[in-house]
Amino acid sequence: MTEYVIDLILFSAFVIGLTAIMGVLTNGIGEKLFGGKNKRFFVEKSASIQTGWNKVGGRSD
């Protein structure tokens, strides 16, 4: 029974890891192939909205 549990845990970790890696790779390929000229649109828009915001946490000396 112990071997079954170990196999189940290893297989689950493999499937979850493989799924995560495939998601990142697919997203990267999709952005490169189909991103066109708007590849950084959302990153730049988010940065422009956040200009002038106060930093959260840390010391403000």
Image (cartoon, rainbow, N blue to C red):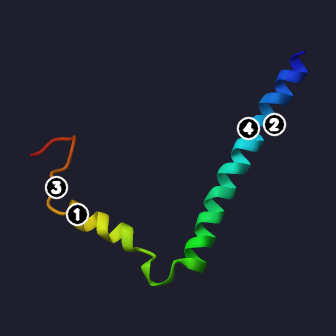
Q: Earlier in the sequence, mark 1 or mark 4?
A: 4
Residues marked 4 and 2 touching at CB (< 8 Å): yes
Distance, label 3 to label 4, CA atoms, is: 40 Å
Mark 2 crowdedness (10 Å alpha carbons): few <14, some 14-19, many ≥20: few
Q: Secondary structure at mark 4?
A: helix
- Select label 2 or label 1 by which is in front: 1
Q: Earlier in the sequence, mark 3 or mark 4?
A: 4
Residues marked 3 and 4 touching at CB (< 8 Å): no
Mark 3 crowdedness (10 Å alpha carbons): few <14, some 14-19, many ≥20: few
Please, what is the three-letter code of the amino acid marked with disc 2?
Answer: Phe
Residue drawn at x 41%, y 74% as measured from the top left: 40
Residue carrying label 3: 53
* Left or right: 4, with 57 as reference point: right
Q: Quadrant of residue 57?
A: top left
Residue 11 in the image: state x and y as whole percent.
81, 36
Please, what is the three-letter code of the amino acid marked with disc 4?
Answer: Ala
In this picture, is 46 found above or below 14? below
Please, what is the three-letter code of the amino acid marked with disc 3?
Answer: Trp
Residue carrying label 4: 13
In this picture, is 43 found above or below 1? below
Residue carrying label 2: 11
Distance, label 1 to label 3, CA atoms, is: 9 Å
Residue carrying label 1: 49
